[in-house]
Image (cartoon, rainbow, N blue to C red):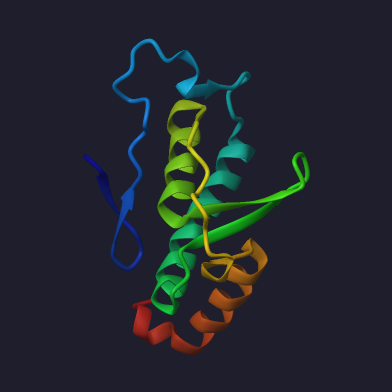
Amino acid sequence: MRQVGATLGGVYEEPRDPFADDPDHTDAVLRFEPDLDESDRADLLEDLHELEMFEQVLRPQGFRGVVVDCADCDESHYFTWGLLMSNLRTLLNDNSAQVHEPAYDPDPAHYVTWDYARGYSDCYLSRHDDELGS
């Protein structure tokens, strides 16, 4: 069963943890030490707010999420809006990160970089502020 949550402009579905019902799977959640400090939490909350805005503005344009170029493996990682928001919420609430399978054969045309999402959303909001109830 998927959890449903509110965004700035609608509803999104959070992906279900594939290991949620497996008590023997110990690496389903990665725990971090030490706990996040207030500055870290503020940064994560800002990222979460931005993601909600990105989804509201970019989903109607056909974009499914964000692409991140990974310096560790030299590959691009594709995250849907819901998956990334779910990861940030878990990090904020539990000081842990859920392990998720990578997107299967994602179409790069449906994903944008964080910087592109920010720039597009800023421009969109400056032109359509009244439509979004801001």
Q: Is residue 24 left or right of residue 46?
A: left
Does 110 sit above or below residue 14? Answer: below
Q: Residue furthest top?
A: 24
Q: How many marks?
A: 0
Residue 16 versus residue 65 in the image, above or below: above
Which x, y percent locates residue 24? 38, 10
Q: Residue furthest front?
A: 105
Give the x, y percent position of residue 89: 44, 40
Asked whether, in this view, residue 45 is left or right of residue 86, the answer is right
Residue occupying the point 50% across, 34% down: 91
Using the image as rendered, state which of residue 50 and residue 82 is in the foreground.
Answer: 82
Query: Residue 1, located in which quarter of the rendered image?
Result: top left
Image: 83 above or below 96: below
Q: Residue furthest bottom?
A: 127
In the image shown, does 95 or 68 lie closer to the viewer? 68
In the displayed structure, does residue 19 sit left or right of residue 31?
Answer: left
Quadrant assignment, res 120: bottom right
* Residue at (46% x, 55% y) in the render: 80
Residue 14 image offset from top left, x and y in percent: 34, 46
Residue at (49% x, 38% y) in the render:
101
Position of residue 58 in the picture relative to residue 23 (left or right):
right
- For image coordinates 71% across by 49% down, the residue present is 75
Q: Quadrant of the C terminus?
A: bottom left
> Residue 128: x, y in percent?
44, 87
